[in-house]
Image: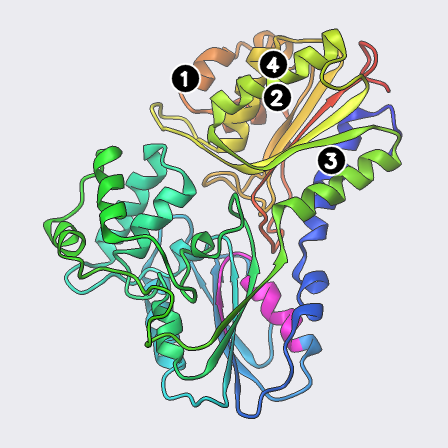
Amino acid sequence: MQPHDPRALLRAMFDAAVAAAQPALCVPRHLPAVPKGRLLVIGAGKASAAMARAVEDHWQGELSGLVVTRHGYAVPCRRIEIVEAAHPVPDAAGETASRRLLQFVRGLTADDLVLCLVSGGGSSLLPLALPGLGLGDEQALNRALLASGASITEMNCVRRHLSAIKGGRLAAACHPARVINLLLSDVPGDDPIDIASGPTVPDPTTCADALGLLRRYKIDVPARALELLESGEGESLKAGDPRLPPIETRFIATPQKALEAAATVARAAGWPTYILGDAIEGEARDVAKTLAGIALQVARRDQPFPRPCVLLSGGETTVTVRGGGRGGRNVEFLLSLGLALDGEPGIHALAGDTDGVDGQEEIAGAVLAPDTLARAWALGLRPRECLDDNDGHGFFEALGDSVVTGPTLTNVNDFRAIVIGGSSTGAP
């Protein structure tokens, strides 16, 4: 990679962010001491199978386990069973896996240890509704939440209070065995309750909170769901609940660490680099307008940072779906950014999901260049109409500017980088 090649720099930074969160690198140093009793390994998430493999490769004693991951994200393990299920809309395989996990941890003793491997995507991979609701209800709720514009924190609050496994319920099933959580964070703020909707941690939010969110976003749910929330029957487990076992939580990778890895790459290539935040939320197209304003101020006035420089950010934006396009919050961000920059010379950008899947597409994200809009118009594309139709994937794919990684086997949320050169060529 040459320092003057913005596109190569963008991809090198993205690859470094993903590499920094690889379970093989992060898991071993967080493994606990061998317990007096049994070690059971459980988990859920897009990175959970790779995490399980890292445990197997570095554990000195006996173990057994059951972990559920996304279709296509399985990693061969010898002693830990890996089950695949659907994401982002749950399926019957995930429901069966959830029931099996609850059964798997029954009958333990205080000498036993449950090592829980949790990463992003676990909410969809652990669908098990409270009595009176079924898988179809959870599927419909997930679709409605994904299209509502609710933040990941808000979505997970609702999920926890209608689930028989989330909101600390899986931890309660492990009692009296100790539980150690190894978390690979994909959420703004790194709150354990929001990673896979907190199956093995206590939850301070309430049924009333979940009910308020359903009303705020005008999400229709079955009468039974309302009954569970209004009566408090769906209440999650709180700190100090005697049903919970001893719980210890360790973060093995976070969005901030991934951004720092990317910054190291950029600085080594001669680019001053600034991390704007690892927990930026909001509508993707609105976040893009804000970051475009900052980038233009840098490019035109050398404020608040002088050119050349790189601006990095992470977090999880949302998309309120109004069109019929292929979606993707990172490509929606990037298309909105391109429209706001309007071909400003010397500014390039990349936005991608570190798990390799932006929305429901097997595409991580895309890259943006000063000539992106001009090339689109030359192909007969209408960028504004593509944005209005939530079709960022269709737009960037037509230009050959999609970023495709395949399953990365990790997930530390969204990665955004804006490279602002010192000249119209983008060179520092």
Q: Dividing the picture into quarters, in which one does residue 351 lie?
A: top right
Q: Earlier in the sequence, mark 4 or mark 2?
A: 4
Q: Earlier in the sequence, mark 1 or mark 2?
A: 1
Q: Earlier in the sequence, mark 4 or mark 3?
A: 3
Majority secondary structure of magenta residues: helix
Label 4 and label 3: CA atoms lie apart by 23 Å
Label 1 and label 2: CA atoms lie apart by 18 Å
- Mark 4: few/some/many CA within 10 Å (<14, 14-19, 20+): some
Q: Amino acid at mark 1?
A: Asp
The magenta segment = 42-56
Q: Which residue is mark 3?
A: 11
Q: Earlier in the sequence, mark 2 or mark 3?
A: 3
**Residue 294 visible to the viewer:** yes
Q: Amino acid at mark 3?
A: Arg
Q: Point out the frontmost of discs 4 and 3.
A: 4
Q: Which mark is residue 293?
A: 4
- Mark 2: few/some/many CA within 10 Å (<14, 14-19, 20+): some
Q: Residue at x 69, y 62 (%)?
A: 26
Label 1 and label 3: CA atoms lie apart by 27 Å
Q: Dividing the picture into quarters, in which one does residue 125 lie?
A: bottom left
Q: Indicate yes or no whether the magenta region holds residue 377.
A: no
- Mark 3: few/some/many CA within 10 Å (<14, 14-19, 20+): many
Secondary structure state at the residue bearing disc 3: helix
Q: Which mark is residue 388?
A: 1
C-beta proximity under 8 Å, tags 1 and 2: no
Q: Which residue is mark 2?
A: 399
